[in-house]
Image (cartoon, coloured by chain):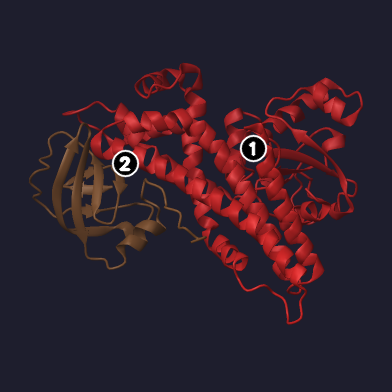
Chain colours: A red, B brown
Amino acid sequence: MSTAQLNILLASGSASIVFDARPCDNSNADKRGAFFRHSSLRNALVIKTSEGPTGLGTRLFLPFDSSNVSRGGMSMICEPKMTCDMLEASFNAKMDHAQIEGDVRKMEILARTPSLAPFLLRDAFERAGVPVDVRYFKVSETEVSELKDILKAKLKPLAAMALPSIGSKIESTKLDVLVTKLWELNDIEFLAPFSQALKIPKDETIETLYAWIGVSYFNREFSKRQTALRGFAEWLVSKPPFGPGVRDEVLAQFEADRKPVRDRMRSIWTAAGSIFDRFNSSYDKLIQDSDASLFVDYLRRVKADFQSLGMYLAVIEQALCIHAAIIRETSGNQRSLDLLRELSLSMRIASDQRQAAA
Amino acid sequence: MVDVNGVPHETLDISNSAVAIIRQSGVNYAKIESLARFFSEKHNPLNQPIKSMHFMMQRASIVVFGYEVDVPSWENVLREHDVRADMKQLEDVFG
């Protein structure tokens, strides 16, 4: 990722790809404590980027000047499984393990969660039982409560499967209890018959059902971006923004840069749509025909789908941020062409890396 | 929730023309005797009488009804309050 791209993403405030862990230094603002405890990490920003063979990376960025991130900094990759030694190696310094252990755990959660969307991230920390100041997640209590209700409602069909069948008297409160248990995913005894009925390997029940909830959540995130993406899609095929007399090679390069961006965006949008279609058809079959076979099949791949959606969302969000920066420039100026070129290049590199990994 | 024959039922899914509910004992779903209605404590616009309702199918603990309400923008109301359990379909914006 180029410095210009990084600066645009950091400045974008896009909460699904940038998590700002810096303590608020505005004296009028809340007095939140540091997110990361170790002094070296205190001014960190975390970015989800589309990079590497899996296509989704989590990068910790430490700015040289915490009040102006565009002045550069150093970055390191966060992994879903990290050790204090890895952190020490990145910093090339000895650190007190007792002091950094909590931070390493936080970095793991940030890396494991396929998007930095505030609700998802806050939920991930809650489920992991890692205490953090929730004011770092830009989502209000009301929004959290509404989203939980909506997602829990989507768990009702699964909860209904656990209800006694024909002829029994079912109280709505009982369904609520079951739905809540499915949401919390912390009662192994309750979950055991589910994993058996849905043929989920015993040690993967929580991760699988969590991923199912996550896919359901992502559907909202993708829908929210549809309008902006349509605008971007139109720009990618619109008349080139040059006046008369533009050199043929400039025009040709502009089109050569737009094409891979359009191809990649189209491909990931279609792939995301296919995931939601599979989710829906397996769900419909379960509800309408009480046939769990498609659902069971779907659950086998839901963890991968959850991760893929995180990667697709990161690519879409990055592209939308860059596009917003391009259209802020004077139409067709050199900086806008450079930004498009870098975006195009990053998409080609990501594509090559995936092919090489495959 | 849906009130069917005077008994409140938990909904599983509501589309524009069909609703899936959790079956309860002692209710004759084949014969709708009183006016059914949707009701919600949290979302007032969802509180609507159901103009007509017909039994469609019954599966284990679920009953599905077709229904009609006298609200022209009912689909929007459902969408606004996100009572659909299924997912929003993504449009082909790259056409």
Determine which residue is flagged by label 2. Answer: A284
| Mark 2 surroundings: few (<14), some (14-19) or many (≥20) residues within 10 A | some
Where disc 2 sits, the SS reads helix
Image spot of residue B58 (x, y percent):
17, 38
Question: How far is the residue under mark 1 from the one under mark 2?
Answer: 34 Å
Q: Where is residue A38 in the image (x, y as percent from the top left)?
A: 83, 32
Q: Which chain does the residue under circle 1 lie in?
A: A
Considering depth in this image, is B48 or A305 the residue closer to the camera? A305
In the displayed structure image, the side of residue B79 where residue A121 appears, left or right: right
Q: Which mark is residue A239?
A: none
Residue A113 locus on image (x, y percent): 62, 36
What amino acid type is highlighted by mark number 2?
Answer: Asp
* Residue name at image x 39 percent, y 37 percent: A155
Query: Where is the C terminus of chain A found, in terms of image quarters?
Result: top right
Q: Can residue A193 be seen in this view?
A: yes
Horizontal relation, residue A148 to residue A34: left or right: left
